[in-house]
Image (tube, grey):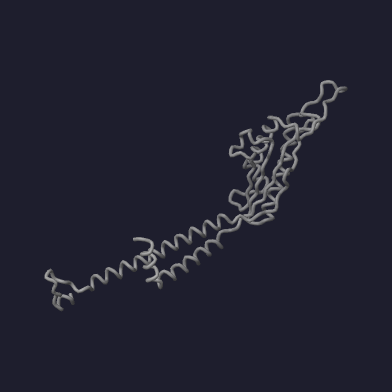
Amino acid sequence: MDFWGTVLIVLRRWYIALPAFLLSIGAALAVYSSIPTLYVSNAVLVLTIPPTGGSLPSNPERPNGLTNPLLNFDWGLSMSASILIQVISAPETAEALGVQPEGDTTFTATNGSTNPEALDGGPFVYIEGTSMSPEGARDIVTRVRDRARIELAGRQRQLDAPPATYITMNEMVPPTEPQPQTGGKTRGAAAALLLGVLASLAAVFSLESFLDARRRRRRVPVAASGVPAAPSLLRR
């Protein structure tokens, strides 16, 4: 059946199509309102080496030269960022931060790569927090950032690194204003509306097929000679 044929059938059975379509819109709105809105906040951290470098001079009378930390990136910082991401992404750390497995607040920490163990993301730590409330999203990002600083300093102390060579963590982007994410709600409502429209068309065509079949049964049977059958046959 072509497009215009379908349109004609829908128009002819408008008393079925219109209520079904209105019900579809109602179902889509119900689905949209039932899906909770998630809020997302982000922060970006960068690891840097002290201006005097990552090692102490062997001769105290000839200290290391001063270097701009933002011009002193190397592979070691990427490795440190990767280790830090693994630490703060551990389930034990999430539990210590108050994140429950079935809770509505979660966070992720990456280096910008789909593989957090890869070193091509540089000395960056990207934190993203999601929650059903704006305050919860920003709060979890803040807590993860603070925990990352504690973990970085603690592990350097465990390795007996000289304090003057400690890697420092700087905020490139502080926790951002939480933004609502309505993509999931929109997709759910669109799916409900599409299913409703398909159900409406199925109801219209089912009714059309039923009425068409009933019309054929009521049609006066014609004999092979073209003479209508007797009335008694028609009653049968």
Front residue of this view, candidates 150 and 18:
18
Q: Residue furthest left?
A: 225
Quarter of the N terminus within the rendering: bottom left
Would you say 94 lies left or right of 217 here? Answer: right
Give percent across and percent down for residue 169: 74, 39
Front residue of this view, candidates 210 and 3:
3
Figure check: 63 above or below 221: above
Give percent across and percent down for residue 151: 71, 38
Residue at image point 50% right, 59% down = 190
Front residue of this view, candidates 227 and 203:
227
Q: Residue furthest bottom?
A: 231
Identify the image quadrant of residue 159: top right
Figure check: 7 above or below 103: below
Q: Residue furthest top?
A: 59
Identify the image quadrant of residue 181: bottom right
Give percent across and percent down for residue 212: 29, 69
Would you say 183 lies left or right of 124 here? Answer: left
Q: For the image shown, how many numbered marks are present on the structure?
A: 0
Identify the image quadrant of residue 236: bottom left
Would you say 122 lies left or right of 33 here? Answer: right
Residue at image point 81% right, 29% down = 52
Front residue of this view, candidates 58 and 152:
58
Figure check: 232 above or below 187: below
Residue at image point 51% right, 63% down = 28
Give percent across and percent down for residue 156: 74, 32
